[in-house]
Amino acid sequence: MILPSRNFLPKAAVALGAMLLASCAGQAVQSPAETADLILTNARVYTVETAQPWAEAVAIDNGKIVAVGSAKDMLRYRGTDTRTVDLGGRLLMPAFGDAHVHPVFGGMAYTRCSLHEGKTVEDYQGIVARCVAASPGDGPIYGVGWQDALFPPKGVPRKELLDAVTTKRALIFESVGGHSYWVNSKALKIAGITKNTPDPANGHIDRDPATGEPVGGLQEAAMALVGNLIPKPTAEEVQKSIVYVAHHFNSLGITNWHDAGIDLAADGTSETLAAYHAVKDRGELSAHVSLAFKWENERGLEQIPAIGAASERAAAWGISAKSVKFYADGVIPQQTAAMIAPYEHAGDHRGPLQIKPETLAQAITTLGKDGFQPHVHAIGDRAVRVALDAFAAAKNSNGTANRPMISHLNVVDPADQPRFGRLGVIAQFQPTWSSNYPYMDLTKQAIGPVRSGYIYPSHGILAPGGMIAYGADWPVATANPLFGLQVAVTRVNYEEPASPPLLPKEAITLEQAIRAHTLNVAYANGMETLTGSIAKGKSADLIVLDRDIFTLAPLDIGKAKVMITLFEGRPVFGNWTAFGAAKAR
């Protein structure tokens, strides 16, 4: 019998033959299936696994975790080509996830005329002037990043401030939260917006109360009135934004994110989905991602077939896109968030719902039959209640609501807090927001002292059995999870540690906060068997911190830094040089 060349034998057969030869020669051998290409040892390993929360070492092979245990346990996984890294007692834990991010908006926000570094209105004017000077011609100037809190009492800026920079070019600047535009007189003129222009559905033009003239603020759907003036990003710019975010997030220890609302045209095409496909195909997507298609409130159930077709196309490309993002309301300072009771000193104004409750329930139920996860933006307590009601209706109809998630939850009525656990709803908070800062001052003024006691009720939702998953809503807030963990356990502004805590009874434990930023995000994204904790068989998505956050004072947690981030077992931020690691030993 003629045997095939060794080069054509299956790897397992070659390995078995080597084992038999070595055994016949009287040598002690180890099964290749039990060797690892990387062992991380002499560490404080926090796994986020209830059955085994702590360990000393982790063995990794081909991007997967093959064993977790003591340093001695890992010796059996060491082979001749194994790299062993002594972490010197440092904290090793799962890489973070982020359940709410806007990569394209964020990337573009920082690559166009960014106002993020401005601290005053005068700063904004200086930045805009420099952007105008750097962009010759007469085309519009667009940017992102102004803070609502700099325009009290309702976070509405005026056109005169931008007119002082120029009246010859249209200036359009989006708030850091993405719910408002600040424009100058030229932009209003080009767009044809006058005192006689009616407010669109689900939006309004800010007007002078005496004259009715537009003052320069456009809220929610009214932003679309100037949308065609903004230069459209190219396909290359969208791809670069995704790559930028991947690198930025990796540097913060994040390897898993949920893109909370990507575009979808009526024909089922999506420029953002196509960009993810291109980046992934080039091997530049160093994260597990889950995409949510944005529900268009001005349309109805007729958009569902396009959502389904786009989701199937994404799956064929190896991208998870089984979530749909609904915008139920707006924001509190501008009084566009939907509240159960009227705003303070605002007559009977309670803020509008951007989607009818019956439409929301019907859409979620219909999509649920095909396994789509509903993700609802809800800031006011009425919007939260309407979302919970819609999930309950879908669960009654379908038997499940498919891991429903509500984002933001600025105010949750006490009667609704236990419903999260009963309905299996994921409460998606931005942890750094649960503290005192200028925007919070505007919020409290708008809703009054009683409802200010129900702001970001983390403990109130966890205690009755609810689940929390953290997401920064970047670029609205910092994406650094360590800052988020610090605020979660202290309820104190990470930038102003001497400030008073916001509702300290709503603080949670560090273990709960870490879980909310790791395994619970993975669950929210349908990836809990793939990532989010340190367990055998999972992707080796890990981070090493320069200090042990479990031993730090709570207000010092944010001082810790990520030394190295592993995605599927390979460094995507940092390297092993800092640990003096030998290739094999």
Image (spheres, rainbow, N blue to C red):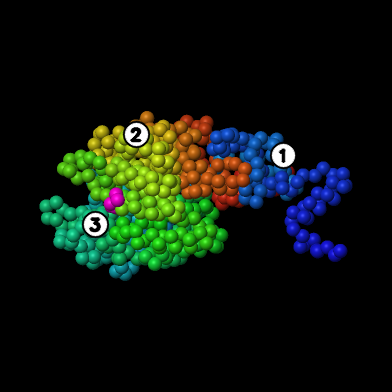
Q: Nearer the viewer, mark 1 or mark 3?
A: 3
Whole-angstrom CA distance, mark 1 to mark 3, is 66 Å
Quarter of the view holding residue 466 = top left
Q: Residue at x 24, y 52 (%)?
A: 157
Q: Which image quarter holds the N terminus?
A: bottom right
**Residue 509, position as x, y percentages in the image:** 46, 32
Q: Amino acid at mark 2?
A: Leu
Residue 424 highlighted magenta (yes or no) = no
Q: Could you tell whether 176 is left or right of 561 in the image?
A: left
**Residue 570, position as x, y percentages in the image:** 60, 51
Q: Nearer the viewer, mark 3 or mark 2?
A: 3
Q: Residue at x 53, y 58 (%)?
A: 318
Whole-angstrom CA distance, mark 3 to mark 2, is 35 Å
Q: Nearer the viewer, residue 192 or 412?
A: 412
Q: Residue at x 21, y 41 (%)?
A: 342
Q: Point out which mark residue 478 bears.
A: none
Total marks placed: 3
Q: Mark 2 vs mark 1: which is more N-terminal?
A: 1
Tag 1's secondary structure?
helix
Q: Main secondary structure of the magenta part?
A: loop
Q: Mark 3 vs mark 2: which is more N-terminal?
A: 3
Tag 2's secondary structure?
loop
Q: Amino acid at mark 1?
A: Leu
**Residue 71, position as x, y percentages in the image:** 68, 36
Relative to 463, is 136 above or below? below
Residue that badge 3 annotates: 201
Q: Magenta region: which residues? A: 354-358
Residue that badge 2 annotates: 502
Q: Could you tell whether 400 is left or right of 210 in the image?
A: right
Residue that badge 1 annotates: 75
Residue 356 highlighted magenta (yes or no) = yes
